[in-house]
Amino acid sequence: MTINEIKELLDAEVLCCEENTNKAVYSACGCDLMSDVLAYVKDQAVLLTGLVNPQVVRTAVMMDMVCIVFVRSKSPSEEMLKLAEDNGIVILGTEKRLYEACGILYSSGLIGEAYKA
């Protein structure tokens, strides 16, 4: 699936790095706790979250993610958009809630990693 397809499925707006929306992605995760993303998420290309602070972008950079989707009409700051642009991370915004957005992507074939305790 490409980031463009995610944009269409979630009726999302591209907020940053539109030139990178043709990238293919194979997995995603939905989370608001960046400590959980760091501890449990491996090999995920897309992060869906309702948390809006610069730490989200920094976490995505550390985890080599290529796209962040902000749900519930959350708006990232200019600082966040600049940080994402500097790292080539696509930022999308959608009105959908986290649960709904994750469900749409999962049912469309975008998987997540199996959780291992």
Image (cartoon, rainbow, N blue to C red):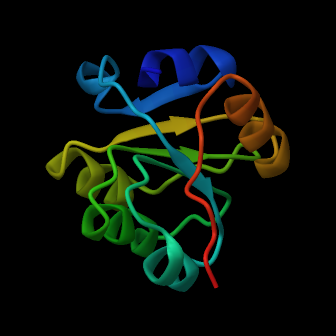
Q: Residue at x 37, y 59 (%)?
A: 80
Where residue 73 appears, as percent x and y from the top left, is: 71, 43
Quadrant in the picture for residue 36: bottom right
Where residue 24 appears, as percent x and y from the top left, is: 34, 25
Q: Residue furthest left?
A: 86
Task: Pick the residue in front: 101 or 14.
Answer: 101
Classify residue 90 as left or right of residue 108. Answer: left
Classify residue 30 as left or right of residue 96. Answer: left
Number of numbered discs on residues: 0
Classify residue 65 as left or right of residue 100. Answer: left
Residue 48 visible in the snapshot: no
Quadrant in the picture for residue 90: top left
Q: Residue at x 48, y 84 (%)?
A: 39
Residue 99 against residue 9 in the figure, above or below:
below
Task: Pick the residue in front: 85 or 107.
Answer: 107
Q: Residue at x 68, y 25 (%)?
A: 10
Where residue 82 appears, as percent x and y from the top left, is: 25, 52
Residue 62 against residue 69 in the figure, above or below:
below
Residue 93 against residue 13 in the figure, above or below:
below
Where residue 12 appears, as percent x and y from the top left, is: 62, 25
Quadrant of image for the C terminus? bottom right
Task: Pick the residue in front: 80 or 28.
Answer: 28
Q: Residue at x 43, y 25 (%)?
A: 3
